Image (cartoon, grey):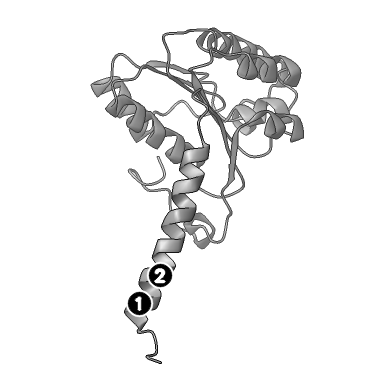
Amino acid sequence: MTKPTKATRHKKAMEKQKAKVDATIASATLERGVAVLLTGDGKGKTSSAFGMVMRALGYGQRVGVVQFIKGQQLSGEEHYLKDHCPDVEFYQMGTGFTWDTQDRGSDIEAAERTWAVAEAMLTNTNLDLVVLDELTYMLAFDYLDADRVISAITERPAEQSVVVTGRGGGSKLRAAMDTVSEVKDVAHAYREGIAARKGVDF
């Protein structure tokens, strides 16, 4: 008996893999928007969310972005959206980080004002994608009511997708999402004394 060659074994393995992938694709028949949570202590959660913004815009979809906690300095993504994507609905809490403000009362007021904008986006049937960047911190710090937030996410228009970013957020939020991805921190340049880099970190 002729021993199967490496090429033959590879072809059979790929045929088996293709059949498995095809079956999985065929079983996914439900058409609706998805809720995605990008969490974990690693770098890249916001970057991934903005990647989905670019993807949606590439298909001519309408997008809304709300940022919680971010500092007052615009990032490269925000500069790009403001300069090249005027149709994107963009709102930033703009109070800076909580360790900068050091005022819980004003942070809660700012969170509630910002959530009002986000909540309106989550009822807007014209928006295909809504990004709620760093929203999880608002829940972790008890700045916003978790049940109200989760209800708005789960009761949004059926065709609308939502992306939530940030560390934590609680088990209720995780349970309400369709897709949860955790970014793990293995190493970070900042801990080696390397300054944040324009175009990479902001």
Residue 81 visible within the image: yes
| Residue type marked 1 | Thr
Residue 44 in the image, given as x and y percentages of width and height: 48, 45
Using a 10 Å C-alpha cutoff, classify the residue at mark 1 as few (fewer than 14 neighbours), some (14 to 19) or many (20 or more): few
Up the image or down, 60 lies above or below 171; here it is: above
Residue 124 in the image, given as x and y percentages of width and height: 48, 7
Up the image or down, 179 lies above or below 96; here it is: below
Quadrant the N terminus occupies: bottom left
Mark 1 residue element: helix
Mark 2 residue element: helix
- CB atoms at circles 2 and 1 under 8 Å apart? yes
Provide the residue designation for mark 1.
8
Quadrant the C terminus occupies: top left
Residue displayed at 37% across by 48% down:
197
Provide the residue designation for mark 2.
12
Residue displayed at 34% across by 34% down:
76
Residue displayed at 58% across by 11% down:
119
